[in-house]
Image (tube, rainbow, N blue to C red):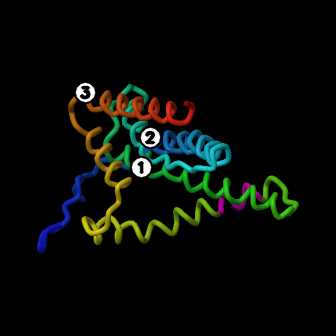
Amino acid sequence: LAPGEEYQPIVPASDRRAEVTAWSVTVGLLLVVVFSAACVYMALRAANAIEAAIPIAILAIFFGRKGLKRSGKSTILENVMVQSIGQAAGVVAAGAAFLIPALYINQIDVEWWQIFLACTVGGFLGIVLIVPLRKYFVKDLHGELPFPEATAVNEILVSGESTSKSAGKVLLVAFGLGAFYDFVVEAI
């Protein structure tokens, strides 16, 4: 931001559209499950963790536009909620990928529910501790710190809000090209 310029959010505070809906929470939780499994598999198989926020943002727009929502097209607020919930997949996956092998390496005998509880508490703590920092990093430090992933997610969600019918197709084609490239790099 230029000196004296004030941050203007994309959605004004006066907008009364629902952000937390049954659709956004359900889709967000489903994507957490799918991407947590994928992220843990990648972390344990390739020793490289991935961040799921960008593909989840793309899928939120796709599912919101393809009639999977009963009341029509999803809003940017609902897509942000889906992405915010889905973003926990990386946190849960990283916790599990680092916790479980450490327990076995140290030969600590634990039950499955203890591992589940540790991953769940770690995921919830990560979410609860980021909430107070969100306003500070998003609003107060807007434009001062580089957040390439957050900037990319923001651009994806804003482009999904556009009225153009090709916005979702462009995102899906980009997602597909990225997946194909990643497959070629990993497999070949």
> Is residue 116 highlighted in magenta?
yes
Q: Which residue lies under the disc numbered 2?
A: 55
Point out the tag, 2 or 3, that comes first from the N-terminus.
2
Which stretch is magenta?
Answer: 115-121
User: On the picture, is 29 further left or further right than 13?
Assistant: right
Determine the secondary structure under disc 2.
Answer: helix
Where residue 4 appears, x then y in whole percent? 11, 73
Q: Which residue lies under the disc numbered 3?
A: 165
Where residue 109 appears, x then y in whole percent? 88, 60
* Chief SS of the magenta region: helix
Circle 2 crowding by C-alpha within 10 Å: few under 14, some 14–19, many from 20? many
Front residue of 135 and 143: 143
Mark 3: which amino acid? Answer: Lys
The residue under the point 19% across, 61% down is 8
Instruction: Specify the quadrant of the image occupied by residue 54.
Output: top left
Mark 2: which amino acid? Answer: Pro
Instruction: Specify the quadrant of the image occupied by residue 5.
Output: bottom left
Point out the tag, 2 or 1, that comes first from the N-terminus.
2
User: On the picture, is 149 further left or further right than 12?
Assistant: right
Image quadrant where one finds the C terminus:
top right
Q: Which residue lies under the disc numbered 1?
A: 81
Relative height, residue 16 to residue 33 (above, below): below
Image quadrant where one finds the N terminus:
bottom left
Viewer-side label of 2, 3: 2
Relative height, residue 163 to residue 11 (above, below): above
